[in-house]
Amino acid sequence: AIGEKKWDEARDRVCESMFLCNVLGGMGSLILIAFPEKVLSMVLPKSGTSVMAFAVPYLRLRAFGMLPALLSSCGFAAYNGMLNTVTPLKVTLTTNLINMILDPLFIFGIGRGASATQSSFILSSLQNGFGAAGAAAATSVSEII
């Protein structure tokens, strides 16, 4: 449609793609948040209970970034279709820069050592780090931003 200069048709296709991203991304996120054990049991061995303990919170947090990731992929395809490759590059660089900054903060914390009784749970977790789930949280936050 863009090659033929049919801008209305191109806009309609992008809108349809965004709608499908919202519907499928929302359903996928809900499934991953509600039933991570069932999804992980398809790819992890049954005896991997120690792995499951780390994988479940990681997958739950990572599921929040599913919808923004799908929408950005759709947007990248629309920009690439218009031969604009610079905008998706800038978005990707910004997202990765935010993720690079947040990853160590969320995984290891900011190291002030406050206990949960001194501050809220989230502030305490951020100070002490989220561990493996921090990587998922950082990636999801960077994709949402």
Image (cartoon, rainbow, N blue to C red):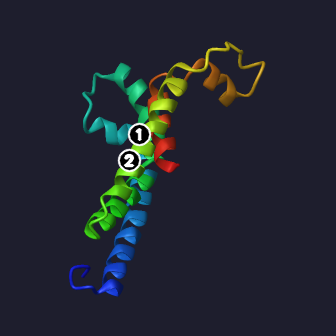
Residue 122 image point, x, y percent: 66, 30
On residue 96, the disc is 1
Q: Nearer the viewer, residue 112 or 29?
A: 112
The image shows a total of numbered marks equal to 2
On screen, residue 118 above or below 34: above
- Asked if the residue under mark 2 is in contact with the one under mark 1, i.e. CB atoms within 8 Å, the reply is yes
Write the residue at 33% across / 60% down: 76
Crowding at dot 2, Cα within 10 Å, few <14 / some 14-19 / many 20+, comes out as some
Q: Quadrant of residue 78?
A: bottom left
Residue of label 2: 92
Write the residue at 49% across / 24% down: 104
Residue 88 image point, x, y percent: 36, 55
The kind of residue on which mark 1 rests is: Asn
Q: Nearer the viewer, residue 99 or 63?
A: 99
Q: Quadrant of residue 3?
A: bottom left
On screen, residue 65 above or below 134: below
Residue 51 visible in rendering: yes
Residue 35 visible in rendering: no
Query: How far is mark 1 from mark 2, CA to CA?
Result: 6 Å
> Of helix, strand and loop, which one carries label 2?
helix
Write the residue at 67% across / 12% down: 113
On screen, residue 91 above or below 52: below
- Which residue is farthest right? 118
Residue 15 image point, x, y percent: 39, 75
